[in-house]
Image (cartoon, coloured by chain):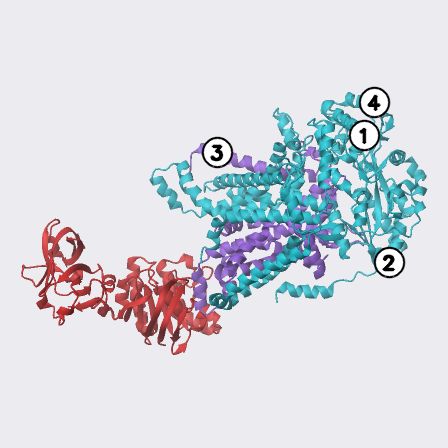
Chain colours: A red, B purple, C cyan
Amino acid sequence: MASIELSSVTKRYGETTIVDGISLSIADGELVVLVGPSGCGKSTLLRMVAGLLAPTAGRISIGGRDVTQLEPGDRDIAMVFQSYALYPHMSVRDNIAFPLKVRRVRPAELDERVRRVADMLGLAHLLDRRPRDLSGGQRQRVAMGRAIVREPKVFLFDEPLSNLDAALRTRMRAEIAELHARLKATMIYVTHDQHEAMTLADRIVLLNHGHIEQQGTPLDLYRRPRTRFAGEFMGSPPMNFLSVARQPDALMSPHLRVARGGLRIDDWDVLPEELVLGVRPEALRLAEHSSAPHRLDVQVAWVERTGSDSYVHARAGESSVVARVTASDGERVAAGSTVTLAFDNMSVFDRDSGLAVAHC
Amino acid sequence: MSERPSFLVRLGAYLVLALATLTVMFPVYAVAVMAVSRAPGFSVVLSPDPSLFTLEHLAKFVARHDANGRWLFGRQLANSLVVAGGATALGVLLATTAAYAFSRFRFPGHRLGIASFVVVQMFPATMMIVPLYLLMSALGLLDSVVGLVVVYATTALPFCVWMLKGYFDTIPADLDEAALVDGASRVRIFYQVILPLARPAIAVTALFSFLSAWNEFIMAATFLSHEEKFTLPVTLFRHVGAYGADWGAFAAGSLIVSIPVCLLFFALQRQLVGGLAAGAVK
Amino acid sequence: MSPWLSVVCVLAVAAPATEGEVVLWHAYRAGEAEALELVIDDFRARHPEVKVRVLQVPYGAYPQKLRTAIPQGAGPDLFIAPNDHLRDFIERELVTTARGVPADRFDPRLMSALTLKNESWGYPLAYKTLVLFYRRDMVDAPPRDTDELLATARKLTGDGRYGFVYQASLPYYHAPWLFGFGGKLFEADRLLPFESPAAIASGDFLRRLTFEEKVTPVDISGALATELFNRGRAAMVMNGPWFVSEIAADVPWAVAPLPVVTATGMPARPFVSLDVLYRTARADGSAGAAVLTDALTSDAASLIRARVGRQPVANVAVVHDPVVESDQLLAIQARQLASTEPLPSQPVMQLAWDPYESALRQIQRGARSPEAAFREATARVLVLARPLPKAAPVRFYVLGALLLVVAGLAYALRQAKRAQVLADVRRSGPAYAFIAPAAIGMALLVGVPFVMGVGLGFFEYEGSQVRFVGLGNFASILGTNDYSPFEPMSFYFTMAVTVLWTVSNIALHVGIGFGFALLLQPTWLLGRGVFRVLLILPWAIPNYITALIFKGLFNTQLGAINALLMKVGLPAINWFDHFASAFAANLATNVWLGFPFMMVTILGALQAIPSDLYEAARVDGAGPWRRFTSITLPLVGPALVPSVVLGTIWTFNMFNVVFCVSEGQPEGATDILVTEAYRWAFMRNGRYGYAAAYSLVIFAILLLYSALTKRLLASRVAEAI
């Protein structure tokens, strides 16, 4: 098992910079999820860790050893690809055994290890099949098996679940979490799905435009987004953003009032005057009476009912707002009506820089 | 695509296909008839006369011996097989490795290399014979089977590389990367991952190399100076002379020379469509 | 080290020594080859100490092989070839003077044909001249003069039969009339204009035979003359002694000397051509070669040739051999020999055959008067024989070349200086390792000959002398001073034909390939595999075989195509007399050869189209035609681009079909650039430099073409960068 150290890792193609001087330490046994929108550089970063791409600048070390110049096969890592990258002409057994054969593991030991992994993943009855005869979930497991059998120091996952349907994805996610708990191996997991990131990660690293936007525990990122981008990316449906102006005693807009009293912000007066308020849909509720300290008047467009919750889609002037309310509250709201929403938690961002100035 | 069209449409399709196939087969039929007929020349094609049937031409072509009693046809058949087989083996080896590099690596000279494979086909081949002769002479490879193998392998190379690269491009690069991460060397990836997956394209490449080596006549006739080293097409052309041709013998020879390639086509036709298609289309 | 390079090393060491062996080359077939084998067998029995190796070189490769092999020391000691290349052989120093055999063994007339600059350059083994063969069941007495010939022929013509058959378009076969009418080709080694009054008279006679009275068919090859004669469709045939072995056993035939030309009262005088035994420099000082020369030219060997090969031989002693005297053919040959002309060996004659043949063809089909046709041929020869480009100032060109090299190096250096490139090169070790074997092979076996070929374009041969002419050859090709660009003989016309040839071929390959691919596509089709294989079959057959077969199919008299036309009541077509029909014949052949490649490519492209696209289109209400134009075409089209580019290059340089099927007829109009280049190299006194320059022009045109389509090509090259 090993820690991973990235220092100022950069990847450039001509004039285009894909990864821009990222430094990151990953502790032994930690599961770090690299998340971000497509094109943010997360896959490129992972492939540099794997050794499939050479960084333009910077160093990568695994377990204290500088591997920047090493071939992928010499880094003691295993990787699960989005496409699974199973060898179509080999049976499941040969696919799983391939990394061992390459390393000239003795046949007896090889058989033993392949069987153990197959048992662990429930693949024992499929060993003689070809990949094309397997279902998506089974293929996914074979790809994992091929990674596990190596007993590497580090596992790399490149969007391993994005080719599966929703139900299977949930199950496999659980299996990966379980695997991590069992193997206690260092893992880097790349996904564009914030939900996957939230549920799996010890630590989330949010990437945007080739640099780290924010990193921390899932709850940290959820509660205290460092930037407006982080707030928008993490959480589903995404955070609502509402422009407000700072008044001496409140943050105001024609539809919105946030009283200074409830905010506990010390240096109120040095805040910029133009701000953006970020409120999570699940923080909004129907106001019982008009005296709530923070409230928002919206015009309801339509109500989406999922059974357990209702999503109220509404407009507040130019901004659209989504509120997650209880099913019973959802029934009380009619499309076209004007309602007042109350909330307690929010993030406040500088309108110009997008940086968070306060979390309440 | 799935449903069957009306009976008339299907009948029409069969009729057109049958007619087209007959037209296409006509010259083949002409060769076959001339080869087994005693009548000298072409008119026999339209009015085949069973009473003129003979296996004499075929037998003569096969039964040739030289002054020392060596069975010339046997030797020349062996030469043809060795030359075509050797050119195929060498050509496939060179083409697959080069195509793999062009498909999987980006390196200085990559574009130039690919372009050059197309460009060298633009210089008329007939004009290369004299310089090639001088070169083979300088290398001491004149009048040798090895010389022909080397020449045929390289002349078929541009097309083979071009086709294989196209096919390799359709094999996901993920597989290479997975193997790399699994610790396999480039060489191992090449022969354990890529080659098995490219079998149809390799079959086509091999077929093409074999075909062009098997059928070549001018270079073989120019480079070889021992009759027991000749390939079959060179012998075939002994029946075409200054004052006309012995059509029966020529047709018989053509038939015999063509049979192995046709068999090969039959054997490989499934791969041919798949392999050539994917390779040439991509 | 690449695997085959090591093979090369091994082989260089293991190259077999052939010291002490006497090598004899010939291009004989059939009875003549048999006779030669007998002579050699006899020699081997008598001289076991001399090792003899005999090689029968296929006729098509013979001159080229002699010219390339002998200067390399890879040629024979002795070779048998006709005498018409004699001066060329001497100028190229392929042959040495004939020594060691007494000249009085041979007919002095024949021996004198081999004497130049007071030396003899070979020994005559046999001679050949045209005589008149006739079927005794059709002709009672052979005609004594041309009037009788015409009268007899007229009587016997009709119902698909012809009175008098010969290869009327070949100058060799026209010569008897030319000389019989009192014409001349040379005066003191100078080629005279073709349009002399006597020659025009001979042309008028040809026109009467073929165009006016139609007693002589056109488009006749040797094989067809044989066929017509054997089937009783030709009463009289003018042909050489080789004809005998082709006459069917059941045909009652006889031979007579050629008739007298009534108009002049002189006998028709055919060419006499010799089978000459030449010696090369290798034979000098070789005792074995001397012994073999003596044996081959001996009276005994001559007797075998006369008896077995039925060759008219040149040895004086054999003429009166009873067997020879009783052989009607040999006796008539000997009689005919009295009125013959030696086959010209002046190099300029090599340039004259083609234009002369064109003139004869035009006369035959009545396209031109003999005078106009011969005048044009004269002009054509002047063009072909024009002086070689002047020597160019080497210094100037070397300077230019140096500048180019320096500029290239500077550019390469500047590229390499960018650290990235160097780093990339260092990083790309494995890639270069994978490419190395192919790259070395290509560089050596394609690159080196290519550079040599390119270099050759700047030189010109004069005999065995090589001269630097700079851009002279290119100026001469592109300047096309001798013809207007619209005449078939000009470079630009040939180029236009080549473009037309390429475009129509590719259009048909793709069109027909598409049609068949669509037909083979549906899953309900039974026997798909069988149809597919049969339709791919043309690809498997060597293309020169295909070309020769098609040439036969398109033959005017006996070709299957004309037979089919006549069966459905259409008139027969003289396919090679008109540009359009000759071009169509070439096109048909090459389409037959070329469509399978496109068909297979298109089949693959069709399979790659996801079927739900068609289903979606169907849901949208698109009919079959709409689905084809909106889905199939746009999706298959781009996939075809690489194949089309490659197919274009192949078709542009498709030598075999044009060379074998139409042979450039009529008058070189259907020649494409590459066949023209070949003619310069191998049929017009070996103008290798000019031919190389021609090839370079072809190369430049194709390069330009691919640059124009580069955007399409680039999409493929640049896809993953």
Badge 1: few (under 14), some or many (20 or more) residues near its Cα, within 10 Å? Answer: many
Number of the label disc, if any, that sits on residue C148: 4
Q: Which amino acid type corresponds to the residue marked 1 in the rendered image? A: Trp
Number of the label disc, if any, that sits on residue B11: 3
Write down the chain letter for disc 3.
B
Circle 2/circle 4 CB separation < 8 Å? no
Circle 3/circle 2 CB separation < 8 Å? no
The reply to whether residue C526 is visible in this rendering is: no
Image location (x, y in percent) of residue C32: 82, 43
Label 2, label 1: how far apart the Cα atoms are: 45 Å
Q: Which amino acid type corresponds to the residue marked 2 in the rendered image? A: Ser
Which picture quadrant has residue A162?
bottom left
Q: Which amino acid type corresponds to the residue marked 4 in the rendered image? A: Glu
Of labels 2 and 1, the one closer to you: 1
Earlier residue among tags 2 and 4? 4
Number of the label disc, if any, that sits on residue C650: none
Residue under label 1, please give it: C177
Disc 3 is placed on an element classified as helix
Write down the chain letter for disc 4.
C
Of labels 3 and 2, the one closer to you: 2
